[in-house]
Image (cartoon, rainbow, N blue to C red):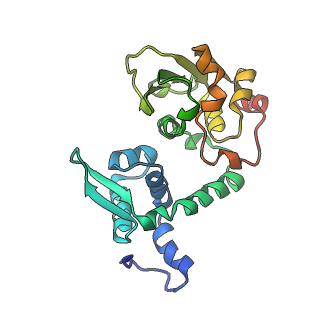
Amino acid sequence: MLLSMARTGYGQFCPVAKAAELLAERWMPLVVRELLAGSCHFADLRRGIPLISPATLSQRLQELVDAGVLDRSPGRSGHVQYRLTEAGEELRPVIGAFGVWGQRWRQHEVRPEEINPEVLAWVMHRRLDLAKFPADHAVLLFEFPDVEIKLRRFWFVIDRGQVDVCLKNPVHDVDLTLVASIRTLVMIYLGQIGPDAAVRSGAITLDGSRVLARTFPAWCPKSAFAGAARHPVDVRAARAQQR
């Protein structure tokens, strides 16, 4: 049984109003997005939403628990774990529809202040297509020449179906180095530029394993909403904008 919300609502019995009382709070759709993507610890949730304050995130999580959308329990390591309930899982198509609409009608231009290398690394590591990745073990290095030095590189360590993201050198031999402007990689992730077109144009360069480089377009991380992009961007025009 869903618990009633303690805060003031819209004063309507309309189901849209009742849902909005919970889901239209600031940051709430992004918190639910991260939970649906598999984040179940507080620190992982913050990695996906770095601009949310710890206090606000705690409040939003408590609201979801109170509403019967989220369960909270102690994990094996002593850290609290969050798991969506049946009511929470039913939000998957709702958040999916939000994402498709945003991709089709609000993704006209990505502003510089919206591009965060750490967030990009975090979301990309969840979307690398392991079913099409041609190796059980590999280390990938992503490098952005246009980003400040401390955020210029990140690594994916792939081992037996798991992808770990490292913001510091994991001291492993690198199998493939990918070099591109951060905007180019964001646009590839969003489906606005095809990875194969980016490679052909030189917008992204691949150095290392020929097998990994050849199959890059297949396993390249892409947003779950990439297929909804309405206006693919010409690679040459995108590169010209960055100069």
Question: In this rendering, is residue 147 above or below 118?
Answer: above
The number of numbered discs placed on residues in the rendered structure image is 0
Instruction: Tell me what residue is drawn at x 73 percent, y 33 percent.
Output: 238
Question: Is there any visible trace of residue 99 in the rendered image?
Answer: yes
Which of the pair 237/104 is nearer the observer? 104
Answer left or right for 192 relative to 209.
Answer: right
Q: Position of residue 80 (x, y in %)?
A: 27, 52
Q: Position of residue 237 (x, y in %)?
A: 78, 32
Residue 95 picture quarter: bottom right
Which of the pair 60/109 is nearer the observer? 60
Question: In this rendering, is residue 67 above or below 51?
Answer: below
Instruction: Tell me what residue is drawn at x 62 percent, y 60 percent.
Output: 97
Quadrant where the N terminus sits is bottom left
Instruction: Tell me what residue is drawn at x 51 percent, y 16 percent.
Output: 175
Residue 133 picture quarter: top right
Q: Position of residue 5 (x, y in %)?
A: 38, 77
Question: In this rendering, is residue 37 above or below 13?
Answer: above
Q: Position of residue 107 (x, y in %)?
A: 67, 49
Question: Is there any visible trace of residue 243 in the rendered image?
Answer: no
Instruction: Tell me what residue is drawn at x 67 percent, y 51 percent.
Output: 103
Which of the pair 58/125 is nearer the observer? 125
Which of the pair 130/112 is nearer the observer? 130
Answer left or right for 221 relative to 63.
Answer: right
Quadrant where the C terminus sits is top right
The residue furthest left is 78
